[in-house]
Amino acid sequence: MSNPASPPAVDVLDERPGLTFPPGFLWGAATAAYQIEGAAAVDGRTPSIWDTFSHTEGRVVAGHTGDVACDHYHRLGDDVALMAELGLKSYRFSVSWPRVQPGGTGAANPQGLDFYRRLVDELLANGIEPWLTLYHWDLPQPLEDAGGWPARDTAARFADYTTLLADALGDRVRYWTTLNEPWCSAFLGYGSGVHAPGRTNGADAVRAGHHLMLGHGLSVQALRAARPTAEVGVTVNLYPVDPASDTPADRDAARRIDGLANRFFLDPLLRGSYPEDLVADLRTVTDFGHVRDGDLATISTPLDLVGVNYYSRHVVAAPTEGVATDSAPSCWPGSEDVRFVTRGVPVTDMGWEIDAPGLAETLRRVHDYTDLPLYVTENGSAFVDSVVDGQVDDVDRLAYFDAHLRAAHEAINDGVPLRGYFAWSLMDNFEWAWGYTKRFGMIHVDYDSQVRTPKSSAKWYASVIRRNGLAAQ
């Protein structure tokens, strides 16, 4: 095991008045199990859909897999030491379902549970609040073989898995997130097929989205039964969606994409219904016969908090008259012909437009749905990073964080009950279909040596946590 990197130097605090966040604001960072843990076939862990997908030729850039990733499974202590040196108040991590419950059914794997017990205990020993995400996309492969998320039974299996973890960790874990970004699981996994399991059927994607939310509701109920004092929520990835122009056609395109990206999840989760216009948009894809009596009441089981993942804005336009629709599988079933417009603004290494005001806009919108406490559970950016003389000067990422935190502060001033912020990501990792070619981390990882190097953004974020706010501009 390598030694942890030297502590990030924290600059002397600028004492000029800046922006102060509310007392007790929860400053954290986030990761996901398949992206960092490695140890893919160690101590009883069995394959997930991402193991299968990444080992299928042509699915992931350069044939990369998560077999080793950041080797966090074997470097847990060192990595928590780095978190403590940054001053993190909370760490959001996900549990690998096939590590804890191989095959997705039956008894828990004791060795898998022991890993997460050690992680939670190490976090608590360092004064870091554990924030556990139950599902960050790593469905056990046998459950996919039985139908995956388009199959209703998967939701019931998720509730059983939830109970195993609540029994094992609920005495030490206060904060629980059921799902991370169900839009990605459903529409990228079963619609466009660019994420695991790589299926390409619009009706399956819609069913998957519904059953993910049903699994969420059943999971909340399982947590309430096992651990009544738990703080339970869900994390959704949301986007402001703007029309490229004020024409009726472009406005309708924006309405359609907003329906699939945002309201498909917000309305059932927080209002107990599907939007009527969304159901109409999808009439050529599905008749919603998979929705049974009582489902929406289960999906809208009351929560304690809502997590928001924010990265960018969508600007869309109506189809170009006379131009044939792209026949490639789409993550926008029923609206495949809507055009996504680029505005010529700065972008990250993912090609995502940088739009900090969109974070405040998104938080205000969720607050329109609910008075529940909100948390930014992911926000971050990929840029090309290099280690030079032992340093990584990621000025673009630092600027990204600074701008988005100022937008978050604006939302708080507008009355949004924002209670915390989790930077994505703690460290560079396996970036899904992009493999190791995209770096989101505040800590640089050399994948050959597994040496961790805190970047300038990490040192800056440590100073933000210390002052509970931002320096004056």
Image (cartoon, rainbow, N blue to C red):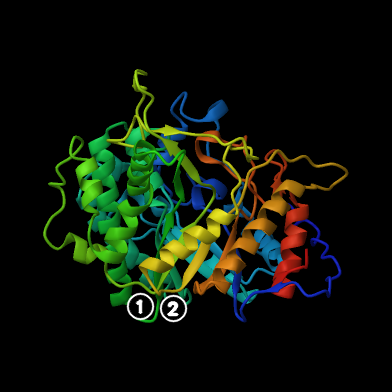
> Residue at left 16%, top 46%?
288
| Residue at x 47% of width, y 52% of height | 43
Inspect the image, locate mark 2, and give the three-letter code of the amino acid beneath it. Answer: Asp
Callout 1: SS: loop
* Residue nearer the viewer, 234 or 122: 234
Residue identified by numbered label 2: 171
Question: Residue 432: image x %, image y %?
Answer: 51, 39
Residue 107, which numbered label? none
Outermost front residue: 247
Q: Secondary structure at mark 2?
A: loop
Q: Nearer the viewer, mark 2 or mark 1?
A: 1
Q: Is residue 1 visible?
A: no
- Earlier residue among tags 2 and 1: 2
Q: Is residue 242 left or right of residue 454?
A: left
Residue 403 percent location from the top left of the image: 67, 57
Residue 48 quadrant:
top left
Which disc number belongs to residue 227? 1
Q: Is label 2 in contact with label 1 (beta carbons under 8 Å)?
A: yes
Identify the residue at image location x=32%, y=37%: 190
Q: Up-down: is 242 above or below 90? A: above
Residue 171 appears in the picture as rendered: yes
Q: Is residue 466 left or right of residue 96?
A: right
**Rendered location of residue 237, percent (x, y):** 45, 53
